[in-house]
Amino acid sequence: MAQLVKVVVDSGIATITLDSPANRNALSQRLLSDLHSALDTAEQASARVVVLTHTAPVFCAGADLKERAGGTVDSTSYVRVIERLGTTAAPVIAAVDGPVRAGGLGVMAACDLVVVNEAITFALTEVRIGVAPAIVSAPLLQRCNWSKLAAPFLTGEVFDARRALEMGLVTHVTHDVAATVDELSRNILLGAPNAVATAKVLLRRAHTMAELQALSESLFTSDEGREGMAAFAEKRSPRWAT
């Protein structure tokens, strides 16, 4: 049986592709299982960057409604995907070149950086089919103020990429998603692996000042910190251990 999610690891970058265009990359149990396997592959390869992209024309249409109507309502795998995108050590970049609906916004919002084509649209359509954007509210409210989400949540209205940027839902709006993702990936690879992973944790979890002081001091005395400062002093590129 063909995989619904493909993964390729090259030069420290794991490219994960949602590849179920027949149902608009809907979040079926099979696709979610394959996505977990792809994340396993990226982690086992110690990828420095994960790019989550898709086969055209749609990034993700949300839940597989045919599957749900047939009685499959266990969301455990979906919840775990959202959690893993946020906790895997490598920064995750969503490369979005097609529309995103409902639960697909949860997957997209769980990524660290979200690069979208300026022409695409979004919608939280749950209320129009008799449910509510429950699980997706967690990653969305981590990115956006609730008042920015009120109209999309309550009406199911379609909104565009510029509004998504203003809301804080996406980080980059561009006419060339691939080029923007390539530039971001290259810049991430310039950083020290542990330092980048630590920076991701700092963005996602609150720390006390005592914790931050201890963390900062440990980083300055780490192998990466010493190499980075030596490279700066010697006017050369740092040599990071991977």
Image (spheres, rainbow, N blue to C red):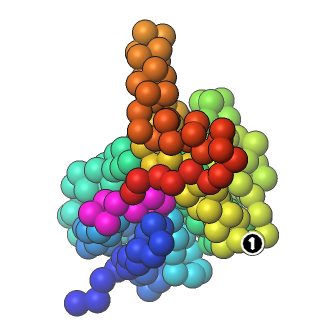
**Front one among 241 and 175:** 241
- Looking at the image, residue 38 sits to the left or right of residue 185; the answer is left
Does the magenta run of residues contain 143? no
Question: What amino acid does circle 1 point to?
Answer: Asp
The stretch in magenta equals 43-50
In-image side of 134 versus 100 (left or right) = left
Question: Is residue 102 shown to the viewer in this render?
Answer: no
Determine whether 87 is above or below 10 in the image.
Answer: above
Residue 72 visible in image = yes
Q: Nearer the viewer, residue 231 or 110?
A: 231
- Per the image, the residue denoted by label 1 is 176
Quadrant where the N terminus is found in the figure: bottom left
Residue occupying the point 62% across, 30% down: 145
Residue depicted at 28% across the width and 89% down the height: 2
Q: Is-magenta flag for residue 47? A: yes
Q: Secondary structure at mark 1?
A: loop
User: Residue 108's x, y, as percent?
Assistant: 52, 56
Residue 43 image position (x, y, % from top left): 31, 60
| Most distant residue in the top direction | 210
Q: Is residue 46 above or below residue 224?
A: below
Residue 131: percent from left, percent from top: 41, 48
In the rendered image of this protein, does residue 203 appear above or below residue 159? above
Residue under the image location 45 percent in, 66 percent down = 12
Query: How dense is the environment of label 1, judged by Cα within 10 Å: few (below 14), some, or many (20 and up)?
Result: few
- Give the quadrant of residue 6: bottom left
- The residue nearer to you, when weighing 22 against 92, is 92
